[in-house]
Image (cartoon, rainbow, N blue to C red):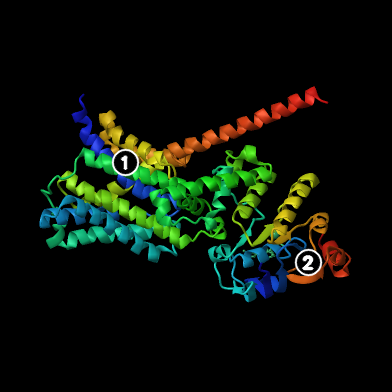
Amino acid sequence: MLSLALERVSKSFGGVQAVSDVSLEVTPGQITGLIGPNGAGKTTVVNLITGVLRLTEGRIRLGDTDLTEANASTVARLGVSRTFQNIRLLKEASVLDNVMIGFHRQEETGLAAQLVGLPSSWRESRSLVKRAQALLERFGMTRFARHPAGALSYGHQRRVEMIRAIASGPRVLLLDEPVAGMNDVEAAELGHIFEDVAKSGVALLLIEHNIRFVNALCRHVYVLDSGRLIAQGTPGQVMHDPGVIAAYLGTS
Amino acid sequence: MSFAAYQPLLDFFLLSLGFAYSQQVVLRAGVFSIATPAFAALGGYCSAILVQRYGAPAIPSVLLALVIGGVAGFLISIPLARLRGVFQAIATLALVQIVVSLAYYLEPLTGGATGIHNIPKLVNTWHLLAVVAVVIWFMYVLSRSGVGRAFDVLRQDEMVGATLGVSIARYHALAFIISGALGGLFGGLQSLYVFTIEPEMFGFAFLTAVLTYIILGGPRSVLGPIVGTAVMVALPEISRPLAEHRQFVQGAILMAMIVFLPHGLVDGLEVAWRQRQARRLDKEDREKRRAHAVAGP
Ligand SMILES: Nc1ncnc2c1ncn2[C@@H]1O[C@H](COP(=O)(O)OP(=O)(O)OP(=O)(O)O)[C@@H](O)[C@H]1O
Ligand SMILES: [Mg+2]
């Protein structure tokens, strides 16, 4: 089980310092929170970890592996998965197909065997379909399996994206506002699933605006404001931190 | 009319279908390559030269055409790995120009502008049918495999593909190799079927025809190129005016498709059908819930 660690990471876009000097650790087996007001740099942190953006300074490590220079597909192959704040599904593909894509890095059959259509590759395909269906079931999404993903409601699309990320069998899972736009009941339902996923040994990073939700799920929370880490600790500790209160009041 | 009257048309359809798949496979992977004429020319000259000049047998000549196409596809994928969209199109068009110019310049080998004639006709309808059947099977297997899914995600959202571990360079190269191999294979077959090969056969008309097959049929499904190619091959036969104004008709169809059915006939209908299914299921669901509420506890 590997932790993901950011060491003094900075990122600037031209003149804008989106992330400055941030160090944090996402530990396996639990849910780590990352909160902060709008524009604090949370999504940028996820983009830096996943190799979608290059960092300006600092280092990122997964266990002993240095991810600092790695590109997106390399980071993914090392076991880091994510969801996107502005949901990115293949809108015309069916929900099932969207989930199946998540299995990409676990497919064992070689390219040649897949292309020639050997029985082993058909067998693997069938077992992947079964696994995809089981995941859909777990999220209560079975009846949408054949729907085009783009036709689903916002909340359901978020679920599909999460299922896809979980299908990829991650060691680190980064969720960017996964319950945005859902009601408390739906959010709590997903919360239970996140807890299960974390319990299975995954290091989970949860970005969220809903403080109550973070409170219920996270053991350790980091607070970002204007790209800087202004507090960290248990949810109770950070919620009473004067700097955090000021940051939230000052912007809302 | 008897079958014999339609046979040349069927043969033309089968050859065109091969080129259509060569074009489709790159588009499916999200590569805007228009290199199919180049691959076809390479394969075509390969088998023509081997058979007509050196008296080589058909099967190895056509297989070599396939290999040369595949190798050319792999080689072109290397410098193109950093290009996207319209830049890919321009770069692959340059490849077509290079290959066609070589056909003009290497006169001792290729016959220059006059080309090569009197190539023995070693390929017949049955051969074409057999090869096309294998290719359709291959495309079907591909489309259901992890490779097909990787192509689909790269076409629709490269970043999502990358964050799921799909290597863009690797799968784009694979698409180019398959495209090149299919282009080379059918180019090689064509030379041994039509008696003759000349550089002009691989010009603008060839390119637009192949693109039309896919834009009409769709970039994803296996059935798409079959429908697209069948329509375009049959149209000029249906009425004389359509034949006389082939270029114009082709242009009009392209424009209409891009505006009204950008996913092509087959893929477009598939998407529309799935959306209808989804709406129907939702409606059923609502009604069930309402009935439940009325019955109440
Ligand atoms: N690609 C980009 N180019 C330029 N500036 C960017 C880019 N991405 C983010 N920024 C800037 O970096 C800062 C941090 O943005 P980021 O999206 O990471 O915030 P966030 O904490 O995720 O906010 P939110 O809660 O609204 O999602 C913002 O000022 C934003 O405008
Ligand atoms: Mg954000």
Q: Which residue in the structure is indicated by mark 2? A: A223
Q: Which residue in the structure is indicated by mark 1? A: B133
What residue type is disc 1 on?
Answer: Ala
x, y percent for residue B20: 34, 45
> Judging from the image, what secondary structure is the residue with disc 2 in?
strand
In the rendered structure, the residue with mark 1 lies on which chain? Answer: B
In-image side of B142 versus A231 (left or right): left
Q: Is residue A163 visible?
A: yes
Q: Quadrant of residue A42?
A: bottom right
Q: Is mark 1 within 8 Å of ligand 1?
A: no
In the rendered structure, the residue with mark 2 lies on which chain? Answer: A
Which residue is pictured at 54% across the width and 57% down the height? Answer: A106
Image height check: is A223 above or below B283? below
Q: CA distance from mark 1 to mark 2?
A: 61 Å
Question: Where in the image, quadrant-wise, is ligand 2 located?
Answer: bottom right
x, y percent for residue B8: 21, 36
Q: Which mark is residue A214?
A: none
Q: Quadrant of residue B75?
A: bottom left
